[in-house]
Amino acid sequence: MKSENMGTEQLELNQVYNNLYGKNLDGFQNERVITIPANAIGRLSKELIETMGVERTKGFLLRYGWNCGVSDALNMIDIYGVKEETVALGPKIHSLHGYQEDNQIEKLEVDFIKGTLNLEGFWTNSYEALEHIKLFGVSNQPVCHTLTGLASGYLSTILGEKVILKEIECQGMGHKYCRVVCRTVKEWNGEVDHELRYYEMESLIHELNQTYEQLKNERDNLNKSFSIHEKLMKEIHRDNSLSSQLKLLNQITKRPAFIKDVDDNVLAVAGISEDDIFSIKIPGFIKVNKTEFIQTNDDNGILITPIYLNQKIVAFYSLFYEKTKPQELDKMIIERASLTSSLSLLNERIRFQSEQRVKGSFLEDILSGTMKIEEITKRAYYLGLKLNPSYSIIAFKSKDQSSLIEELEFNEELMNHIDRYFKDHKINVLIGQKSENIIILLSGNQLLKNQRSNQLLCKKLYNHILIKYPKNRFEFGISSISNTLDDIGQLYEESLVSLKIANKSRNIVSYDALGIEGILFQMNNQKNVQKLIRKKMGKLMEEDKLKNWELMKTLYIYLNTGCNVLKTARLMNFSVSGLRYRLDRINEILETDIKKPSISYQIFMVLQFLILSGEVDIDIEMDMDMEGEELDIE
């Protein structure tokens, strides 16, 4: 019985197929059919995907299947009319085409008057699913696009309403069957709206037009950005600064622009004041590592891109936008500008390093004492330096580097930072590295008029460095001040002596405040000790040597009595007025006030050293009662 029914069903399908695609009464083919191997269609799909992409290939196959389904439906309507059996015959016809091996309708509800349809079923061994697995492997989404379009086109033509088939399971995804649901667009209630675009015949042309316009815009943008890049490169070739490049960009874009380094210091600005820049609050500024638009408030924002140097972010290029947002061209322009800025900074760094090497070598030659004054003056002129009196040296170092290489790299970065600070303040300096310390020679500046102002300068420099390196610890040694280049070597030794004494609790040490400590630290260098003594007491020694050390003797007793005029006059059998005259003369020769505790302490220590070493011939006993008379100086 079952066999007979199957035979009848097969005969009926064969009759339907023959009616559609066989010969008519006149001997002509009703509808010509071409047989194409499934693997050939599979390879075609593969080439389409590689050429057009997955999305466009899906649309192409859906529309191709739709047209095939429409053709089959029109033939069925022409022969059998519009009825439920025509709907049910569709899947059988498609099996005869070879699209799938078998199919089964599990649910069919159709109303031709209302134009509604609800069909559920499955098919097995879809050629698309099998070919996709063979060529690409298991997919993560349905792949039977031709069959989906075929069924949708067939049912839409029969019903007269747009019907969309949806694969909810697919053999191409590893499922046992390809399970499908067919409904009209209305009955889907928006579930398949995102699929409808694939069925539009104009979509490919529209996409091509869009692609063409996009490519055209990109070409125009590339041409514009390249033209701007060329202009910026010319600024570099002219050896112009970041400021000139920024002004050029401001003229082109008509937008305020500025460059800040990673420490939030403004390096260049155009079209906006520095005060306005600092008033702009940019959240997460330092975290920017690619081109981003950051909203500063509801209406305004900043387009920021990093500037790299040696694979490190060293600064940020920014364009300001008021009540608008950047276009793609703006991003291309600012990225081009950041590249030219990188080149400028690289050129500046190379120039600075070369300049620092030359200046460092020059400073080392000066400190060695091997150059004559005329040669020093000549080389300073060629380097654009003004080595004018007065002179002082600052030696300092960081205490936080773990290796010599790390220390040298850090010092190079630090010298660049210090050099910019002195240039900004128009202070004449010569900077170099020596024995792992940074050495600064200051000259010809009002800040060197006395030791107090010199210390103030050093303190300001120290505070400035701490802003950039707040976690580092620095120690400074400051030399005394001299009016001659002949003393540069001595000034260098003084700065090193001061640096040796500096520590965590006393990080800035001035040599002039050391007194006898300075001498003791240089005892192994008699030449420097003698220079120091000559510097402090030289004039007095020269004048007093011919007078049998009368002034020296007076100075010693005066200091030994705690700077007590009455005691000194009594011990020397001098009148008070006569003693005051002699003390005024000593102050005049020494160019200081010996009554000051810090000064009197230093002079007394130097004087004792001179007496003990035999440089000054004074009888310490002096035929007087010195018992109980001790120096009372803080």
Image: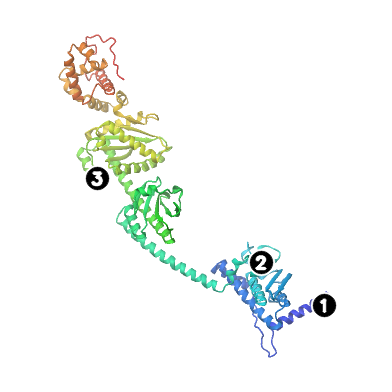
Q: Are marks 2 and 1 in contact (CB under 8 Å)?
A: no
Q: Amino acid at mark 1?
A: Glu
**Hey, which residue is sitting farthest bottom in the picture?**
26
Q: Nearer the viewer, mark 2 or mark 3?
A: 2
Q: Nearer the viewer, residue 471 or 217?
A: 217
Looking at the image, is mark 2 or mark 3 earlier in the sequence? 2
The mark found on residue 167 in the picture is: 2
| C-alpha distance separating marks 2 and 1 | 34 Å
Q: Quadrant of residue 170?
A: bottom right
The mark found on residue 384 in the picture is: 3
627 to 186, vertically: above or below: above
Q: Nearer the viewer, residue 262 or 184?
A: 184
Q: Position of residue 290 (x, y in %)?
A: 45, 53
The mark found on residue 4 in the picture is: 1
Q: Quadrant of residue 628?
A: top left
596 to 30, vertically: above or below: above
Q: Amino acid at mark 2?
A: Glu
